[in-house]
Amino acid sequence: MSRQSFTQQTDNFGILLQLLTTITNYSPNEDELKLINLTPYQSSLMDATKAVDQTEAEINSKLIERNQLLYAVRTGLYSIAQNVKKYVKSVYGATSPEYSNVSKIKFTIPK
């Protein structure tokens, strides 16, 4: 199983840091690879990932809300638009300019 999401990569990085703390002779020369610098970096990754996950959850919630408004049976925009087209057709006729204008407006339901 591939663990490639940002959340999973951040978790894996934390596990790597835990492993590095158990290796007593881990002492890199590069500052950016020292545990004292990697730990705050991992914390910043976790904070950023958490913020993105929360935003994604909010977006998904709003998409559900939007779809309900647009596609609800009888009360959604799609249903209302179809009823308006039918009404204009019944009042003005199928060959009328009014119906011709209204019928050109396309509304679709996602699959």
Image (tube, rainbow, N blue to C red):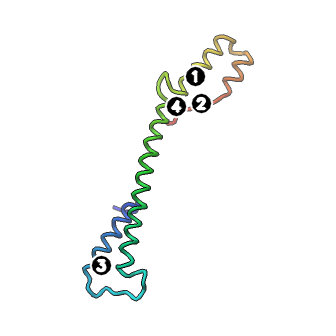
- The structure residue drawn at horizontal position 43% and vertical position 46%, both measured from the top left corner, is 58
The residue that disc 3 covers is 20
- Work out whether mark 3 precedes mark 2 in sequence or the reverse, and give the earlier one: 3
Which three-letter amino acid code belongs to the residue tagged 3? Leu
- Work out whether mark 2 precedes mark 1 in sequence or the reverse, and give the earlier one: 1
Q: Is residue 101 above or below residue 58?
A: above
- The structure residue drawn at horizontal position 55% and vertical position 27%, both measured from the top left corner, is 78
Query: How far apart are the two marked residues, 2 and 4, measured between alpha carbons?
Result: 10 Å
Closer-to-camera residue (94/14)? 14
Which of the numbered marks, if any, corresponds to residue 48? none
- The structure residue drawn at horizontal position 71% and vertical position 23%, both measured from the top left corner, is 101
Q: Secondary structure at mark 1?
A: helix
The residue that disc 1 covers is 82
Which of the numbered marks, if any, corresponds to residue 70? 4
Q: Are the residues tagged 2 and 1 within 8 Å (C-beta)? A: yes
**In the image, farthest residue toward the right:** 97
Q: Secondary structure at mark 2?
A: loop
Which three-letter amino acid code belongs to the residue tagged 2? Phe
The residue that disc 2 covers is 107
Q: Residues within 10 Å of mark 2 (few under 14, many from 20)?
A: few
- Work out whether mark 1 precedes mark 3 in sequence or the reverse, and give the earlier one: 3
Which three-letter amino acid code belongs to the residue tagged 1? Gln
Q: Position of residue 55 (x, y in %)?
A: 44, 51
User: Where does the N terminus fall, quadrant-wise?
Assistant: bottom left
Query: How far apart are the two marked residues, 4 and 1, measured between alpha carbons?
Result: 12 Å
Q: Residues within 10 Å of mark 3 (few under 14, many from 20)?
A: some
- Work out whether mark 2 precedes mark 4 in sequence or the reverse, and give the earlier one: 4
Which three-letter amino acid code belongs to the residue tagged 4? Leu
